[in-house]
Amino acid sequence: MKPIIEALKNRYAVKLFDDSKKLTVEQIEDLKAVVNLTASSLGMQPYRVVIIENQKIKEALKPHAYDQAQITTASHLFLFCAHQQIDNAYVDDYMNLISEIRHQSRESLKGYESMVSSFVNSRTKEELEVWASKQAYIGIGNLLTSAAIAGIDACPMEGFDPQAFKEVLNLDKMNLQPLALVALGYKSPEDKYAKLAKVRRSNDTMFMQF
Ligand SMILES: Cc1cc2nc3c(=O)[nH]c(=O)nc-3n(C[C@H](O)[C@H](O)[C@H](O)COP(=O)(O)O)c2cc1C
C-alpha cells in the first residue's frame, strides 16, 4: 500500500506538460486496459473514451478549453463521454457479449436481461446520462491512480465546452456526450504547480467513524 500512497502524494494536476515527451504505444495500451478493466454498474460500461494524440486536433480544441496549456502540451488526451443511446439494443448487444465470452446460452441470460432492461427502461435519457457519467468518473479515478503509480503525469479536466468539443470531434454521430478529460504525458520542468504543497482536509474532517 505504501508505494500507492507515495505515488498519490507525488501526483498533482499538471498545468504544463513537456510537449517533447510522448507516451509510447505500449503505455497507451496499458492505460486503455486500466480504463476497460474498471468496474461499472451492471457491467454496462455506459461510456466511451476518445483518445486524442493529433496535434492539429488538440490545437482546435484548446480555445474551447479556456486556452489551458495542458490541451496542447500533453502527449494524449483521454476524453470520457457518456454513451447517449442506452436502450434495448444496447442491452441486447451486452447480453450477446456475455453469452459469447462466457459461453453461456442467450436463453440462460433472460432473467438478467429483463432486470437490466427494466433498469434502463424505467429511467429518462437525462437520468441515464447522469448514471453513465458516474460510471465514467470511476474510470477517470482509476486512470489517475494508475498513471500516478506508473510515473505518468496527468491532469483531470472539466474546464472545457462539451458542445464545442462535440462539434470539433464530430461526436454527435457516435451518440457521445463529453464529460471530462484526462490529459496525460510528462510534466514540464517549468510547471510551477509541481512544487506546491498538497491542500487536503484532515482525516478527522473527511472521515466519520462509528
Ligand atoms: C473532475 C475534475 C475536473 C478538473 N478540471 C480541471 C481543469 O479544467 N483544469 C485544471 O487545471 N485542473 C482541473 N482539475 C484539477 C483540480 O483542480 C485538482 O485536482 C485539485 O485542485 C487538487 O489538486 P491536485 O490534484 O494537484 O492534488 C480538475 C479535477 C477534477 C477531479
Image (spheres, rainbow, N blue to C red):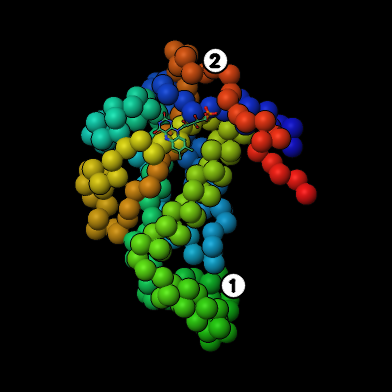
> Within the image, what quadrant is residue 156 found in?
top left
Judging from the image, what secondary structure is the residue with disc 1 in?
loop
In whole angstroms, how far apart are the C-alphas of marks 1 and 2? 49 Å
- Depth check: give the residue in front, 75 or 12: 12
x, y percent for residue 76: 40, 35
In this view, the mark in front (1 or 2): 2
Q: What residue do we see at 30% from left, 59% from top?
A: 175
CB atoms at circles 1 and 2 under 8 Å apart? no
Placement of 183 over or under 10, stated as above or below: below
Q: Residue furthest right?
A: 210
Tell me the quadrant of the picture where the N terminus can be found: top right
Say few, some or many: other residues with alpha carbon within 10 Å of mark 2 (under 14 / 14 to 19 / 20 or more): few
Question: Is 62 left or right of 99, judged from the image as shown?
Answer: left
Say few, some or many: other residues with alpha carbon within 10 Å of mark 1 (under 14 / 14 to 19 / 20 or more): few
x, y percent for residue 25: 46, 38
> Within the image, what quadrant is residue 149 found in?
top right
- The residue type indicated by label 2 comes to Lys
Label 1 sits on residue:
102
